[in-house]
Amino acid sequence: MTRRNREYIIDGYNLLYKLFEDVSDRPLEKMRERAESLLMNFQVSEQARVTVVYDGKNAGREHHDYGVLNRIFTRKGQTADDWIIDYLSSLHGSTSNFTIVSSDRYICRHASAYGAASMLSETFIAKYIVDGKGVKRSAKTGFNRDKYNEEPLHQKEVDRWLALFGKSKG
């Protein structure tokens, strides 16, 4: 099996709390955006498929957002752990190309029982995301912390990119 076929299902909030040292001062949405940006870079560099599952405590029903990165917010009363276990169960043993990322050993044991690989969030972060000083540099994506800027692009720069790709404002 090639890496191209590998699928990672990530316990979203579990990863956030391992990735960011002090989460109490940060807005949750900003942490999710930052983590998802890092995961998109991982996805491109590893040619893998990534699904991030968040506890949707306030959602009335399950919400799926399929874009570059698959995001799932579970329905009210369902945890990300429950969703991951139910999803693995629904695959009826076709899980050999899945890796579950969570520091919850209960989930890791279920992943193993269903035939999927598992990886602790800390291991995933150390191996693919952070090098001890910041973001792991990826030769394939060119992404690194020195180049990353959280400031939005200026309108001039947006216009230049739109012109470069043959798009017009509108």
Image (cartoon, rainbow, N blue to C red):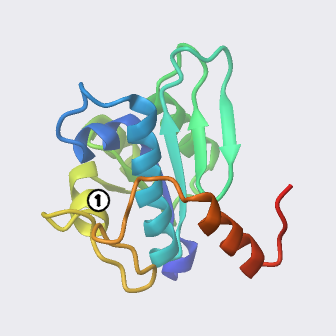
- Callout 1 crowding tier (Cα within 10 Å): few <14, some 14–19, many ≥20: some
Name the residue: 30% across, 31% down.
26
Which residue has dot 1 on it?
A: 124
Residue 127 position, x and y percent, is: 25, 68
> Is 8 located above or below residue 89 in the figure?
below
Residue 130 position, x and y percent, is: 23, 63
Q: Residue furthest left?
A: 132
Please tell me in which quadrant of the rendered image residue 109 appears: top left
Instruction: In this rendered view, identify the residue nearer to me: 107 or 92.
Output: 107
Name the residue: 22% across, 58% down.
123
Quadrant of the snapshot with the C terminus:
bottom right
Q: Residue furthest bottom?
A: 139
Q: Residue furthest front?
A: 156
> Is 70 located above or below residue 128 in the figure?
above
Q: SS class of the residue under badge 1?
A: helix
Residue 34 position, x and y percent, is: 41, 49
Horizontally, residue 129 falls left or right of residue 131, namely right
Name the residue: 70% across, 67% down.
159
Instruction: In this rendered view, identify the residue nearer to me: 71 or 103.
Output: 71
Instruction: In this rendered view, identify the residue nearer to me: 151 or 138.
Output: 151
Horizontally, residue 72 falls left or right of residue 24, namely right
